[in-house]
Image (cartoon, rainbow, N blue to C red):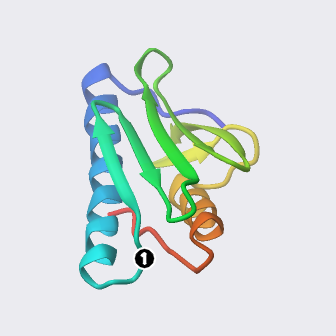
């Protein structure tokens, strides 16, 4: 897996888009009464808190040009490869991993669109 070289500006734009996409999906789910997830964003850090008080944290890592995800089941690091954020250990795409982790925390299937 060879990460796609990004300028700092490209990295910032791509990670901002990821965080905005997550927020948009959650807003839609809240509006449609699908699931109750509290979200709080501070700069490049987005915390998602579920009804059982468990959390998922998505955090940008600008010096490394990585995107990190932490949940009660583990921590994951993602690099930008061929147009998507890919887990550096097992090659799983970011939004697939986020959907898997959020589904676990929520106790119901949730699929983040990634758009």
Check the image and name the residue furthest to the front: 52
Q: Is residue 1 above or below residue 106?
A: above
Residue ID at (42%, 76%): 35
Q: Is residue 90 left or right of residue 107?
A: right
Percent across and percent down for residue 92 are: 66, 54
Q: Is residue 92 shown left or right of residue 90? A: left
Quarter-wise, where is residue 36 in the image?
bottom left
Q: Residue at 28% of width from left, 41% of height from top? A: 16
Along the line of sight, the residue nearer the viewer: 4 or 87: 87
Q: Using the image as rendered, state which of residue 93 and residue 53 is in the foreground.
A: 53
Q: Residue at x 63, y 65 (%)?
A: 100
The residue tagged 1 is 35
Secondary element at image label 1: loop
Check the picture and name the quadrant holding the N terminus: top right
Q: Which residue is at 47% across, 42% downward? A: 58
Instruction: State left or right for residue 6 relative to residue 99.
Output: left
Does 9 sit above or below residue 39? above
Q: Position of residue 78 (x, y in %)?
A: 57, 39
| Residue 74 location (% of width, % of height) | 72, 43
Q: Dot 1: within a 10 Å radius of its alpha carbon, few (fewer than 14), some, or many (20 or more) residues?
A: some
Q: Is residue 68 above or below residue 65?
A: below
Q: Nearer the viewer, residue 11 or 56?
A: 56
- Picture coordinates of residue 2, whole percent (x, y): 61, 33
Asked whether, in this view, residue 108 is left or right of residue 37, the answer is right
- The quadrant of the image that shows the C terminus is bottom left
């Amino acid at each position: 897996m060879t990460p796609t070289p990004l300028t700092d500006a490209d990295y910032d734009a791509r990670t901002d888009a990821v965080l905005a996409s997550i927020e948009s999906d959650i807003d839609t789910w809240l509006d449609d009464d699908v699931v109750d997830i509290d979200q709080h964003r501070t700069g490049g850090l987005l915390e998602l808190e579920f009804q059982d008080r468990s959390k998922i944290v998505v955090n940008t890592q600008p010096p490394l040009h990585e995107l990190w995800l932490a949940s009660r089941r583990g921590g994951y690091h993602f690099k930008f490869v061929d147009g998507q954020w890919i887990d550096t250990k097992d090659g799983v795409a970011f939004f697939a991993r986020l959907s898997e982790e959020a589904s676990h925390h929520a106790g119901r299937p949730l699929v983040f669109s990634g758009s």
